[in-house]
Image (cartoon, rainbow, N blue to C red):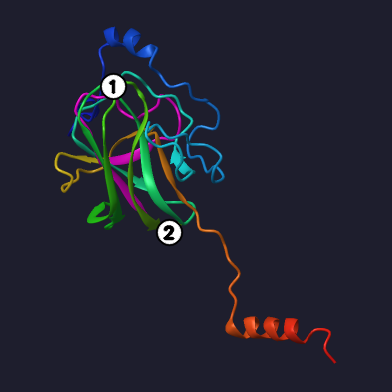
Amino acid sequence: MVQHRAILSYRKPVWVARCTAAMLVLSAAQPGWSFEPIGSGGVRSHADLVQGTPFSEGLNPDVSVDDIRRYSVSWYALPYTPSVSYRIDRVEFIHGEGTGTVKIEIRTDNGGVPSNTILTHGEHQLQESVGFQGADMAPAELTAGTPYWVAFQVPLDSQASVGGGGVRIEFLWGSDGMTWHLRAPTEVWIARFFGDIPTAVTPMTWGNVKARYWHSETLGKP
């Protein structure tokens, strides 16, 4: 049986003082899933992006990161079922303290594990400072109530995007992004998802249009 320490490890205590100043200033209120109204939060960490699509929802987005946790394998996959249909185009985790490329993919579900169908993907270079870091990706339609997977590859021994308290989430792990091991012990994963939620529009039939046009043209005429 794979030990928990081999999947997400703990940094040695001597590192704690170094990381304290780099910890995120996050509210500890409302831990767990956060279904915030579109546009109510989610400041992007990408320095080149001044404007973008708004924060949609997240996994424990208001939980402070546990700064002594480290990644010990290359690939992880988190289950994600959107509460609302929207076009996802960015995913962020709390990462840092390492160098290399972080790859993030949105995949469909295949009987409780990630399929090999990648709906969209992106990557970014890991920054040393611990904070929300993420990847932009081509917009992909996600349907409310449909299970998906957020698969990501990270540099080994970098900061893990997990918190000390919040909603614990089961996950899968692997070494190549293709073969996934059974669900590991749960962790308080932290992630933020961005995208546009379509605005509801009342459908108009051609009959409605003709009737309104006729009414406006004939109004007031004998």
User: How would you rate the neighbour count of disc 1 (Cα within 10 Å): few for under 14, some for 14-19, many for 20 or more?
Assistant: some
The quadrant of the rendering that contains the C terminus is: bottom right
Is residue 105 visible from the viewing direction of this image? no
Tags 1 and 2 touching, CB below 8 Å: no
Q: Residue at x 54, y 46 (%)?
A: 38
**In the image: residue 13, left or right of residue 188:** left
Q: Nearer the viewer, mark 1 or mark 2?
A: 1
Is residue 116 visible from the viewing direction of this image? yes
Q: Residue at x 74, y 81 (%)?
A: 216
* Span of residues in magenta: 147-171
User: Magenta includes 191?
Assistant: no
Q: Which residue is mark 1?
A: 128
Rendering quarter of residue 162? top left
Q: Identify the element where label 2 is drawn.
A: loop
Q: Which residue is mark 2?
A: 143
Kind of residue sitting beneath label 2: Thr
Whether 13 is drawn above or below 62: the answer is above
Q: Position of residue 12 (x, y in %)?
A: 25, 12
